[in-house]
């Protein structure tokens, strides 16, 4: 009995659930400047007739306008041509309908255009110049997404031989030269090929807002907005606009938001997986940790952050490669609270630590029984 209790309490600590402050509820990736989005979304749910979907749009738009951290909205994360392009997605947890734009050019309001895809088409994803054309035909103004500051930064990057960049297996050597590049014979034992499995730490410039909202009535929505990775190959689309990757929500279960090395993360559909984990009965924290560990098994050196919330507003997060933070506000909270999530160790080491703790608990228990 006692032994079970000891192990049980140990596990309880491990699976600690962050209690819900009640509905309505808003949660999103990152603290700091991203809490302006949390507040805006929360206040729209509390003060008005805004739906869960409206609140996601209000929250993500706030970050697009404020250029949260330079990684959302105009004027950030230029590609090799110094152009900012935007990726965004919005999803309705009741109908499971989602709308996205990818590689959106010359339009600032990415999440609002994504909402138009959701509301006014039966499609899920529009991309590139033709997404811009769709936006213009819906009344969105064209604008220059490049700020003077970004143009200067881009000139300095070129001056520095276009370092860092995302090219591999090309000539001239992308580690010392600008393009144009041409592909060379694929060689899976070359250092360049291996580097593609271990993202360059200097390239971790890819924060994203991913948000999940729960209306007082219990309906849910989710969304993501980002300007992607700095110095990306023009045309690159990240995880943000991919349903199940950047974010995901099923109002019967819960929702998830992701941030990090999108090129890697989208190979795992981490938010789809996290919501399925909730459906299988995992706590939000365990659901998040499980998906981060799945990615770490193949790509131990990237930066990842996952926030998960169930339909009641219980929440948890997991990350690796950085100290991930997420923000939430719900019920009658006066202010947004930020949760700091220490990075997970690589899976095998993590498993070993849990094993050692369990072994110690057993040993202690045995000693206790002996004395009795
Ligand atoms: C929402 O209501 C609170 C008080 O209930 C008020 O302080 C706040 O300014 C309102 N916000 C908006 C956006 O209306
Ligand atoms: C956009 O603005 C930047 C910075 O002011 C400028 O360098 C660039 O030429 C502009 N692009 C266009 C197409 O006007
Ligand atoms: C592949 O790369 C390795 C390491 O750089 C090199 O030793 C080998 O000769 C290359 N193989 C081919 C076929 O180019
Ligand atoms: C919110 O602020 C008011 C006034 O400062 C205080 O009375 C109340 O307890 C606060 N509520 C919460 C949930 O912190």
Image (cartoon, rainbow, N blue to C red):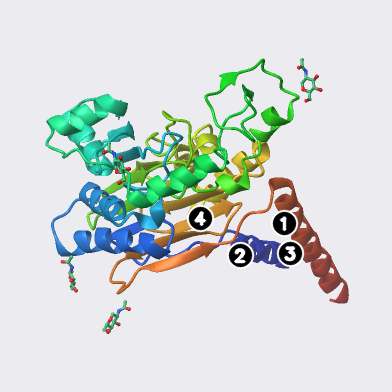
Q: Secondary structure at mark 2?
A: helix
Q: Which residue is mark 1?
A: 354
Disc 2 from disc 1: Cα separation: 11 Å
Contact? badges 4 and 1 (CB < 8 Å): no
Disc 3 from disc 2: Cα separation: 16 Å
261 or 270, nearer to the observer: 261
Disc 1 from disc 3: Cα separation: 16 Å
Residue 246 at least partly seen: yes
Q: Quadrant of residue 101?
A: top left
Taking the image in four quarters, ligand 1 sits in the one at bottom left
Q: Please tell me whether mark 1 or mark 3 is closer to you in this view.
A: 1
Q: Please tell me whether mark 4 or mark 1 is closer to you in this view.
A: 4
Q: Is residue 64 left or right of residue 171?
A: left
Q: Which residue is mark 3?
A: 3
Q: Which residue is mark 4?
A: 317
149 or 324, nearer to the observer: 149
Q: Position of residue 185 (x, y in %)?
A: 67, 15
Q: Quadrant of residue 355?
A: bottom right
Q: Secondary structure at mark 4?
A: strand
Quarter of the N terminus within the rendering: bottom right
Q: Which residue is mark 2?
A: 13
305 to 1, vertically: above or below:
above
Asked whether mark 1 lies closer than 8 Å to ligand 4, one says no
Disc 4 from disc 1: Cα separation: 18 Å
142 to 205, vertically: above or below:
above
Q: Is residue 49 left or right of residue 191?
A: left
Q: Position of residue 97 (x, y in %)?
A: 27, 33
């Amino acid at each position: 009995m006692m032994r079970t209790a000891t192990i049980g309490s140990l596990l309880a600590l491990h699976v600690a659930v962050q209690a819900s402050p009640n509905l309505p509820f808003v949660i999103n990736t990152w603290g700091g400047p991203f809490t302006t989005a949390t507040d805006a979304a929360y206040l729209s749910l509390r003060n008005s007739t805004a739906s869960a979907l409206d609140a996601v749009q209000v929250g993500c738009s706030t970050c697009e306008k404020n250029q949260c951290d330079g990684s959302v909205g105009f004027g950030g994360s230029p590609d090799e041509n110094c152009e900012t392009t935007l990726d965004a997605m919005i999803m309705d947890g009741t109908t499971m309908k989602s709308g996205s734009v990818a590689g959106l050019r010359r339009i600032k309001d990415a999440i609002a255009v994504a909402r138009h895809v959701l509301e006014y088409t039966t499609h899920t994803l529009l991309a590139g110049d033709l997404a811009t054309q769709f936006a213009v035909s819906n009344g969105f103004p064209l604008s220059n997404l490049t700020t003077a500051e970004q143009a200067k930064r881009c000139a300095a990057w070129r001056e520095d031989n276009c370092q860092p960049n995302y090219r591999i297996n090309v000539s001239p050597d992308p580690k010392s030269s600008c393009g144009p590049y041409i592909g060379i014979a694929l060689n899976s034992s070359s250092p360049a090929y291996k580097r593609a499995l271990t993202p360059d730490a200097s390239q971790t410039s890819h924060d994203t807002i991913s948000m999940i909202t729960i209306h007082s009535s219990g309906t849910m929505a989710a969304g993501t907005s980002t300007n992607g990775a700095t110095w990306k190959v023009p045309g690159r689309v990240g995880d943000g606009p991919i349903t199940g990757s950047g974010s995901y929500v099923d109002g019967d279960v819960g929702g998830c938001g992701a941030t990090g090395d999108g090129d890697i993360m989208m190979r795992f559909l981490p938010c789809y997986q996290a919501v399925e984990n909730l459906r299988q009965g995992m706590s939000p924290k365990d659901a998040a940790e499980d998906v981060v560990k799945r990615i770490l098994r193949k790509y131990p050196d990237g930066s990842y952050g996952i926030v998960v919330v169930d339909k009641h507003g219980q929440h948890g997060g997991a990350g690796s490669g950085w100290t991930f933070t997420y923000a939430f506000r719900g019920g009658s909270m006066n202010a947004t609270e930020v949760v700091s999530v220490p990075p997970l160790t690589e899976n095998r080491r993590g498993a070993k630590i849990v094993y050692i703790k369990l072994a110690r608990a057993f040993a202690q228990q045995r000693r206790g029984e002996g004395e009795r």
